[in-house]
């Protein structure tokens, strides 16, 4: 039986937001407009859940208005026999050239913050309030 674990994805989003906020701080950005994240099929992360959890994690932060862009990365393995690096299905980690099962995972299990798009660093003067 599969059950939903929203806390997992929320925790992931909170960790992402912490990274985004650190980038924004170091660039003196006033706000973040876009966040690009790459997700491997073997990362154990459900993209739709990340999408729905992101606004909750981002609320009230510098990324509160940011759009999340998720990109699925391919699964790649390197063969211990023939040395080929091939793209494979997530449930079939065999060498694409010689069908050997002894392979090393090169990519596909990662969740990476790739890019943060920010608004200008100049702090805006705030005359209203
Ligand atoms: Zn091979």
Image (cartoon, grey):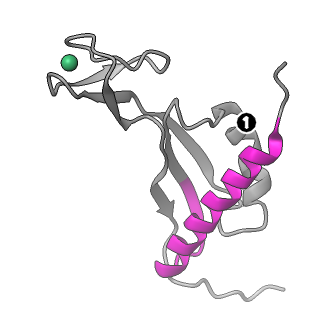
Quadrant where the N terminus sits is top right
75 versus 121 height, above or below? above
Q: Toward the viewer: 12 or 51?
A: 12
- The picture quadrant for ligand 1 comes to top left
**Residue 47 location in percent, x, y?**
63, 34
* Residues packed near mark 1 inside 10 Å, few (<14), some (14 to 19) or many (20 plus): some
Residue at x-position 68% and y-position 53%: 13
101 versus 113 height, above or below? above
**Residue 27 location in percent, x, y?**
46, 78
For residue 16: magenta?
A: yes
Tell me the chief SS of the magenta region. helix
Quadrant where the C terminus sits is bottom right
Q: Which residue is mark 1?
A: 49
For residue 120: magenta?
A: no
Give the farthest residue toward the left.
82
Quadrant of the rendered image containing residue 31: bottom right
Secondary structure of the residue carrying numbered label 1 = helix
Q: Toward the viewer: 48 or 30?
A: 48
Residue at x-position 73% and y-position 36%: 49
Quadrant of the rendered image containing residue 87: top left
109 versus 91 height, above or below? below
Please provide the residue range marked out in magenta. 5-34
**Direction from residue 9 to residue 81 in the image, left or right:** left
**Residue 74 location in percent, x, y?**
39, 28
Quadrant of the rendered image containing residue 48: top right
């Amino acid at each position: 039986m599969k059950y939903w674990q929203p806390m997992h994805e929320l925790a992931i989003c909170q960790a992402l937001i912490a990274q985004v906020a650190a980038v924004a701080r170091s660039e003196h950005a006033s706000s973040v407009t876009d966040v690009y994240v790459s997700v491997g099929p073997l990362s154990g992360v459900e993209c739709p859940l990340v999408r729905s959890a992101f606004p909750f994690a981002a609320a009230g932060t510098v990324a509160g208005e940011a759009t999340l862009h998720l990109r699925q990365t391919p699964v790649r393995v390197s063969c211990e026999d023939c040395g080929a690096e091939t793209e494979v299905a997530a449930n079939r980690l065999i060498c694409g050239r010689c069908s050997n099962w002894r392979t090393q995972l090169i990519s596909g299990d990662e969740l990476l913050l790739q890019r943060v798009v920010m608004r200008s660093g100049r702090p805006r003067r705030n005359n209203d309030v």
